[in-house]
Amino acid sequence: MAEKFEFTPFEKEETSNSYLRLKDSIGASLMPGDEEKMRAHLKRTVDEHVIHRDVFGLNPILFGLQTATIVVEEIGLRRDAVLAILLHPSVEDGFLSIDEVKVQFGESVARILHGLQRVGELYKKNPVVESENFRNLLLSFAEDMRVILIMIANRVNLMRQIKDNPNDEARRDVAEEAAYLYAPLAHKLGLYKLKSELEDLSLKYLEHDAYYMIREKLSATKETRDAYIASFIKPVEEKLLQQGLHFHIKGRTKSIHSIWQKMKKQKCAFEGIYDLFAIRIILDSPLELEKMQCWQVYSIVTDMYQPNPKRLRDWLSVPKSNGYESLHITVLGPEKKWVEVQIRTERMDEIAERGVAAHWRYKGVKGETGLDEWLNNIRSILETSDDMQVMDQFKMDLYEDEVFVFTPKGDLFKFPKGATVLDFAYHIHSKIGNTCTGARINNKVVTFREPLHSGDQVEIITSSIQKPKQDWLNIVKTSRAKAKIRLALKETQVKEGLFAKEMIERKFKNKKIDLEESLMTRLIKKLRFKEVSDFYKQIADGVLDVNTVIEKYLELRNKEQGILGDNMAQSADGFSLNHGGESHEDKTNDDVLVIDQNLKGIDFQLAKCCQPIYGDKVFGFVTAGGGIKIHREDCPNAPELRKRFGYRIVKARWSGKGSSKYSITLRVVGNDDIGIVNNLTSIISREERLTLRSISIDSHDGLFSGNLVVMLDDTSRLEALIKKLKAVKGVMNVTRI
């Protein structure tokens, strides 16, 4: 018998407090019997051992109440969302069906649970969640917007609860997903406070040292900062009041995440970020006087403080394309500190703060027109409507021009509407496309002409005897597939030409007739073929008989011999042209990389930024041109690539071992001493299968630092070399760069 679920004393107290707080907030929206039925259900889940702690050891009932509190207090949802949150664990575990929920709590609660279940199934396909495609598909799957809002609240709550949890790996996964998926979703919905909290907590768990460094510095400077803001604002307020303007001023400190991003972008320390806060002057101004009064405030501020003309942003005269209007200036305040001042009216501030399309585009998040308008309506309802039932009328009908489909492994791809199975096959790989005969869509067998629909899971069926046909160009919709089909048709033509050529040569040999290339070329022209490939194609297709070609060849040879006698030009048969290059297979580099599970033989390049070598932990990055670059996992560019282009990351690992050599740069630092260079180079020269390509060393104040560029074959040899170099007297440090 399963052990009964037990609440800790702390959990009992927190559960009681959360329950009472929630009841007080949504009591008016509850229906008769709701509370009694919910209490009975939760008691039954405990008594029948249905509930269990998650990977972090969290209590699901308390966690649900905490999530529901966020949904109510910070987003504005009511009864239906709260009940759905509390019932979701039971539905997920199969203890309660959606039909039972519909009977007990109504259609609306059941619909939210159905949406949560559908999104859960989407997750099980394990797509790359950091991709924009996945965010869009998630939105389109959540027919009721409350599903997405609940998911955001759930993730905020989870991020709050796991701050002291020892499961670092699981916590890291949760934090990465919050940064890639939930923070952008919250931003799109105008939930800026929750978005900032998700970003800050993600930074706290993913880059612990950076987070606490910035937090401590902000804390240490808060008093000074507040005093500075007050001293900056006071004379401005006095001047504005003297002019008879109606206004209010607010200051805001940048989030820790925002400061960290700026430090990385500007490559400077915390002290180098001068705009840690912004002052916002918001005017209560009639529509017809807005611009005039904004420029009046600008004049007052710049009369008092020296402006930086390079930092003036005038979105009053010409508003941004998304409707954002404001005047931004940066001025030199007291103590010679730069301060950003934003000047706008109440109307402009409302558009910037509440108008989702305006604000999230202003912050640089890409969007699409249909989504802008729809989310703006949602945000407006969230802020102005007490009756959240209005939400029920909203259905996602976005991305009418796009479809999102999965591979069996859960990878997610986007295609234009009308794209077919054949488009999908060519998107995966040319070889898959060339041999495609059909597919299993959601386990149902279809032809390769079948159109794709959002959410389809597609498994391509291939046959070794399948070949691309000319009419395939009319089946596919994507230019990528069309280009690959044209290339395949051309390659097929070349292969058929080679086959036909071999067949002719065999026939000539059997008949003991010498085949002269120059004479054959003249014959092809005489037969009125514009392209040699057309001639061989007709041979391969059986349109032109080989015996007829031999007869024509002999006729032409006899005719020319009669005219020229024996003074024929020498045959070019034995001539070969060397281009000086070498094929991929001929290279001495026979180390093998396995890319994306079991694919071998794919062309790749080693990234210059981190110079990976055999034995390094690596990953692949699909470039804009379609090639693959191999990076070390600890490459300095890896975090940015994963964050911005996660959908282009593929797995890679070394397999086999060849004779390849790689260029590696080592940074050596130590005490300057006579003979230090000889000591270093002598160690390298004694190493087998290792070549010194260059050495450059600088000396300053008794210390030397320099770079050694060596050629070696794997990480084990590299580690051994570093160990030996570190043992040299006077060497303080050796690092790979």
Image (tube, grey):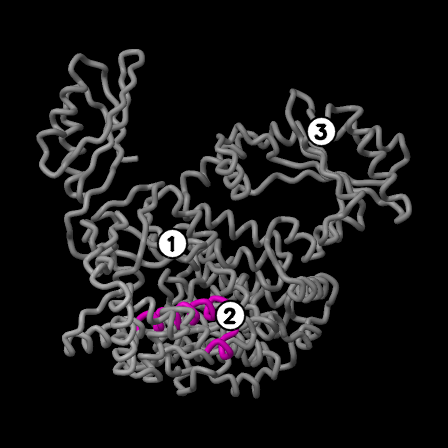
- The amino acid at mark 1 is Phe
Q: Is residue 157 magenta?
A: no
The stretch of residues the image draws in magenta is: 472-495
Res 392 → quadrant: bottom right
Residue 562: x and y in percent read 26, 69
Residue 490 inside the magenta-drawn segment: yes
Compared with 179, 404 (above or below) is below
- The residue at 71%/74% (across/down) is 390
Q: Residues within 10 Å of mark 1 (few under 14, many from 20)?
A: many
The amino acid type, in three-letter code, at marker 3 is: Pro
Name the mark nearer the viewer: 3 or 2: 2
Q: Residues within 10 Å of mark 3 (few under 14, many from 20)?
A: few
**Residue identifier under label 3:** 309
Q: Quadrant of residue 389?
A: bottom right
Compared with 424, 264 (above or below) is above
Percent position of residue 117, x then y:
48, 76
The residue at 61%/83% (across/down) is 107
Disc number for residue 125:
none
What residue is pinned by disc 1? Answer: 621
Mark 3 to mark 2: distance in Å? Answer: 47 Å
The majority secondary structure of the magenta stretch comes to: helix
Residue 213 at x, y percent in the picture: 45, 35
Residue at horizontal 50 percent and vertical 71 percent from the top: 404
Residue marked by disc 2:
478
Q: Judge whether 593 appears above or below 204 on screen.
A: below
The residue at 45%/56% (across/down) is 161
In primary-sequence order, the first of circles 1 and 3 is 3
Frontmost residue, 171 versus 620: 620
Q: Tell me the element at label 2.
A: loop
